[in-house]
Image (tube, rainbow, N blue to C red):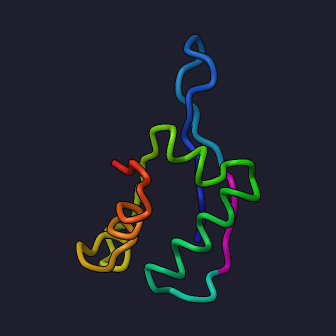
C-alpha cells in the first residue's frame, strides 16, 4: 500500500502532497490495513493521539475493504474515534 500525506505547513505555500511510505500488507482485511496504516503513521511521528486531535482525511480507490459500511477501513476508523472525513 502506498501512503501519501497532504498537509499545510505554511499558509503562504499552501497545501503540499508528499510520499510518506510503502507498506507491505500481511493482511488485506480492513483490520489488517488499519493496523498497518496506523503503525506506519506512528513510525513517522503521527500517533493515534495526534490523529484524534487533528483533521484527518482518507482517500482510497473505493474498494469495499476500504469503504464498506459494516467492516471497511472507514468503519473501523470511525469506531477508533478518529475524525475521518
Residue depicted at x 44% and y 53%: 82
Q: Is residue 22 left or right of residue 54?
A: right
Q: Residue extending furthest top? A: 12
* Residue 64 shown in magenta: no
The single residue placed furthest to the left in the displayed view is 69
The image quarter in which residue 79 lies: bottom left
- In the displayed structure, would residue 19 be above or below residue 8? below
- Is 64 above or below relative to 21? below
The spot of residue 42 in percent (x, y) is: 70, 57
Question: Residue 25 at x, y = what percent?
Answer: 62, 82
Corner quadrant of residue 21: bottom right
Q: Quadrant of the N terminus?
A: bottom right
Q: Is residue 26 left or right of residue 80?
A: right
Please say if 42 is above or below 26: above
Instruction: Please tell me which residue is depicted at 54% across the width and 82% down the height of the picture.
Output: 32
In the rendered view, does 36 fall on the left or right side of 56?
right
Dominant SS in magenta: strand
Taking the spot 41% from the left edge, 56% from the top edge, the residue there is 81
Residues in magenta, as a range:
20-24
Q: Is residue 27 above or below residue 18?
A: below
Q: Residue at x 67, y 79 (%)?
A: 24
Amino acid at each position: 500500500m502506498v501512503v501519501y500525506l497532504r498537509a499545510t505547513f505554511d499558509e503562504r505555500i499552501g497545501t503540499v502532497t508528499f510520499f510518506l511510505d510503502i507498506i507491505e500488507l500481511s493482511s488485506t482485511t480492513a483490520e489488517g490495513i488499519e493496523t498497518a496504516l496506523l503503525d506506519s503513521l506512528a513510525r513517522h511521528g503521527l500517533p493515534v493521539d495526534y490523529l484524534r486531535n487533528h483533521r484527518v482525511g482518507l482517500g482510497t480507490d473505493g474498494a469495499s475493504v476500504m469503504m464498506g459500511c459494516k467492516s471497511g477501513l472507514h468503519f473501523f476508523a470511525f469506531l477508533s474515534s478518529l475524525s475521518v472525513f
